[in-house]
Amino acid sequence: MDSETITGKLKQHFGEGIIQADETSVMLTVIVPAGIIHPLVRFLKEDLGFVFLTDLTGVHYPEKELPFAVVYHLHNLADRIRIRIRTFLPEEDPLIPSVTDLFSAANWMERETYDFYGILFQGHPNLKRILNVEYLDYFPMRKEYPLEDQEREDKDDRFFGR
Amino acid sequence: MRIRKEKTKTTVFSEDDSSVMEEPVDLQHTTLNLGPTHPATHGIFQNVLTMDGEKILGAEQTIGYIHRAFEKIAERRPYYQVTPLTDRLNYCSSPINNIGWHMTVEKLLGVTTSKRIDYMRIIVMELARITDHLVCNSVIGVDSGALTGFVYVFQERERVYEIYEEICGARLTTNLGRIGGFERDFTPSVYKKIREFLDRLPKVLREFEKLLLRNRIFMDRTIHVGPISAERALNYGFTGPNLRAAGVDYDVRVACPYSSYDDFDFIIPVGTHGDTYDRFCVRQEEVWQSLKLIRNAIDNIPEGKHYMEIPEFYLPPKEDVFSKMEALIWHFKIVMGEIAIPAGEVYHSVEAANGELGFYLVSDGGRSPFRLHFRRPCFIYYQAYPEMIKGGVLSDAILTMSSMNVIAGELDA
């Protein structure tokens, strides 16, 4: 199986749902709307042999209309093919279906993504913070939270290209 | 330890009345805090166990005690300054993390390294894998009551650390290598020390195996302890020796070869039951395979430079900085992080000592990563721990934990 076959099968199965599929970033990357993420991952797992969820994480693009990206990396171990799925979510109510029923590994990965980006995974059995303290009232990996206190006057960042 | 009394309601039908009576029965469940600081967890993370006598009914994990926000810090640092952060993930084998990161950036830049660099990297990475496996396997011995082997193999770990010292000057958090190669070539003393180590380790390893591998007590303590099936292990995202012990022959070095691993011939050991004993045996065999790999790499290492000609990213030699204008400019630009990196998105993974260590890097062309995510193997497989220890006893749970090779630094990032 190669990436063209996979793209073909996905387009045949999901039609308009596949917004974009290309290989510009070395790995086959598919962009889909959040709504079809669960049937898509199920199809990849059960019909195309992507039995391994390598990674699940979030990215924040504050400039974009849909600022939150959730990125899935799946791996077909038998054919040695990886696939990346990206989906974009709005700033208000970043809701996405959970894939914990398909992959137990997604449990903590989704909790981590929630913890750092505030993305809400619907159907997750235990969606609470994992690495940060529970009473934290913001999502620290969002770009609006600076790493250092921006009010500091003892450092002049102009000379450091920041 | 806290004893909690739970009133469990049982329903009893009385003869004269059809209504249901409720009669309380006393059931005692013990809640046991295993951690956050506990000598057997070998790191800071907590398990709240619900126990019935010595039997474990369930466990709930709390992690994040040493979360240091590396992913956030990396978003403010130039690329070469991210390397010291990766040291502190799996600190038992930091060179693998360092080199994994360098290779990720090289993938983004489109740089292909020479065979010499690849072979040098293989030597260092396999040395790191040996130390990591020695620590993990000897700690399984410690937790089952055999301290001798631990002290014995730590002597050998010390020798590997001396080799690291010769290569990069540091021991534990190595910050080894640079984007595009190594900071300096291997000195003759490095080769000498590696060859001495290769001659010495097999004897020690055989003795260590004699101590544990067919030891009746050790086998009784580890066989069928904390097992996981291949199917569950895959579903839980297991990688590395833990997955291979369950019988799946997935190894990143072979499945997606990097750093010229495909030039070498080595065996991927697999287990059958995925229990503690299988994990021990798989690691033990991997140490032998790593020895073979190092020996092959050191015998066939090609001549050449220890770095690639990419002046925009590789720091020039210090004597050139003092005497050549060009070198001084590059030095300044690299150190101040003024070099533009191409925009793009890459995922690169290496076979770290405890599984697939992945780097998901998004670059917007700026001086530091736009987003960097570490796929930490033990963060992903440690969530299977409650399932693996359920129904077992406490002392087995301790052994299962040490055989999973959970490193707190990597767990919490």
Image (spheres, coloured by chain):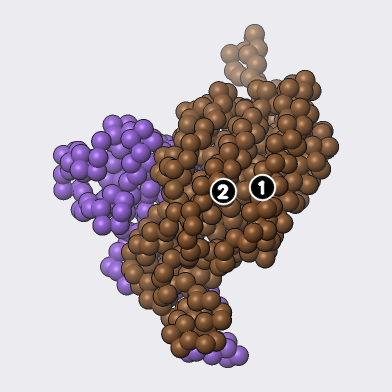
Q: Is residue A5 above or below residue B270?
A: below
Mark 2 and 1 residues: CB-CB less than 8 Å, in contact? yes
Q: Position of residue A134 (x, y in %)?
A: 59, 58
Assign a secondary structure to mark 1.
Answer: helix
Chain A, hue in figure: purple
Residue at position x 42%, y 75% from top? B311
- Report the side of B160 relative to B2 (left or right): left
The answer to which of B86 and A134 lies nearer the viewer is B86
Residue at position x 58%, y 45% from top? B294
Give the Cα distance between marks 2 and 1: 9 Å
Query: Chain for mark 1?
Result: B
At label 2, the amino acid type is Ile
At label 1, the amino acid type is Arg
Q: Position of residue B325 (x, y in %)?
A: 46, 88
Q: Position of residue B174 (x, y in %)?
A: 63, 61
Q: Which residue is mark 1?
A: B195
Determine crowd level at label 2: few under 14, some 14-19, many 20+ residues with C-alpha closer than 10 A.
some
* Mark sitting on residue B298: 2
User: Among the chains, which one is brown?
Assistant: B
The quadrant the C terminus of chain B occupies is bottom right
